[in-house]
Amino acid sequence: MTGAQSAIAIASAVRAGTQSAAEVARAALARIQAGNPLLCAVTRVLGERALAEAEAVDAAVAAGRDPGPLAGVPYAVKDLFDVAGLPTTAGAAMLADAPPSPTDAEALRRMRAAGAVLVATCNMDEFAYGFATVNAAHGTTRNPHDPERLAGGSSGGSAAVVAAGMVPVALGSDTNGSIRVPAALCGVFGLKPTHASLPMEGVFPFVDSFDDIGPFARSVADLELVTQVLADGAVEGATAGLRVARLGGWFTRNHSVEVTTGLDRLAAHLGGLETVELPQVDRARSAAYLMTAAEGGARHLPELRRRQLAFDPATRDRLIAGAMLPASAMIAAQGFRERFRAAALRLFEHHDVLVAPCVGDVAPRIDDPTVTVDGERVAARAHLGLFTQPISFIGLPVIAAPLAVQSLPLGVQLIGRPGGEAALFALARSLEQAGVLAAPMPMSAPA
């Protein structure tokens, strides 16, 4: 078995009895042991649990029972999902000694019921507040395509383990782009679902207004299969005669020639795309920033008052600033969100999918963690979500997909109406089959 084997192929082999889940789990654990010292993507290896789950799958096969659609598929989760018997740290050193969770998060329960095998927890920005996966306790997650570059965040560990071929799928969370940004920078597929459509029970919260969970995978088929498991059913919706448009205005600036070329190729493959605009995207991003800061600051205010020095300074200062925002600013941001959402929904009266860049360029270097916005170099940790944050703001579903480019990975957002995931998967499948989208395997992927 190699790291490139898909979830669907693993499950098929395990269910047929031609490969054992225990064998698959041991191979995944070995890949993590070999690759993680460089990438710093995994925080806890769950070897004992993984082998126990894998042996239960093999026992079901031996007894003639179907272990589920993800039979024997190894996966990893961002370190903010409850894992029974372990503290849920949300990437924070101050929670390392928290009481262990008595149960798994609901998403993990559904994955296990489908036969999947949990092998590891993954690195993240502390309390999910950042786009870089620079963690004071666990270190910086490195990009599998160039270890001198960031993986993106805050679900950077989850994206990196999939991109490196350690596991075929992983789970993360997305508040302002925390699945989509690392998916783009690491060259894998990721889903931010319609807000509140996938189970959040047992997931450490950041901003209830925007928080969602979703999967990473190296193919559209694997991404859809895990989504179906998490959704506890098929992804419903019409897929024929899709009407696709390209977002202009805000989404045409602050990105590289390579991003433009990739988007142009996608548009040409679809026969050319009409360009449409969302109004006042700059205000939407500002309002999302404000709501994130205010909700995050309010959530952590008791601990900030009690032991502020226990926080990562880069996280602490932003949370304190958010906690000090006046209520009037939050009310204004919420009012604008309703107007902005209404404008977006009007676009979906004529289009099924909107296409936009995911990030503006390839992954920033770790020794220069900045991006260019309007001609100025600014911190990547706060600004890599330039194109993702306004979409989170109104709860739309998005597939982040890797463009087939010759450079380091770059990603595109396929954006749908609320509940429109089926259309996104249909378009992504078509573009993947045509070679417009593709997840590259790093040269250094573990065998």
Image (cartoon, grey):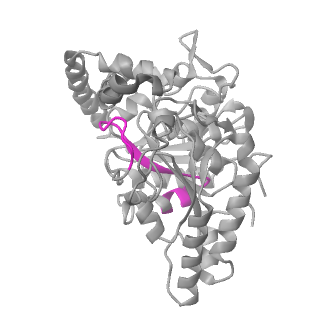
Q: Kindly identify the residue that appears in the image at 49 percent across and 29 percent down.
A: 130
Quadrant holding the N terminus: bottom right
Q: Is residue 20 above or below residue 272?
A: below
Task: Work out whether residue 210 can be spotted.
Answer: yes
What are the residue bounds of the magenta stretch? 203-225
- Residue 223 counted in the magenta span: yes
Residue found farthest to the top: 376
Q: Is residue 232 above or below residue 248?
A: below
Residue 179, image x, y percentages: 50, 41
Left or right of 98 on screen, residue 350: left
Left or right of 5 on screen, residue 231: left
Residue 281, image x, y percentages: 37, 22
Depth check, front residue: 230 or 242 = 230
Residue 306, image x, y percentages: 34, 26
Q: Kindly identify the residue that appears in the image at 54 percent across and 78 percent down.
A: 56
Depth check, front residue: 21 or 304 = 304
Residue 51, image x, y percentages: 61, 70
Q: Kindly identify the residue that appears in the image at 47 percent across and 47 percent down.
A: 191
- Residue 30 counted in the magenta span: no
Total residue callouts: 0
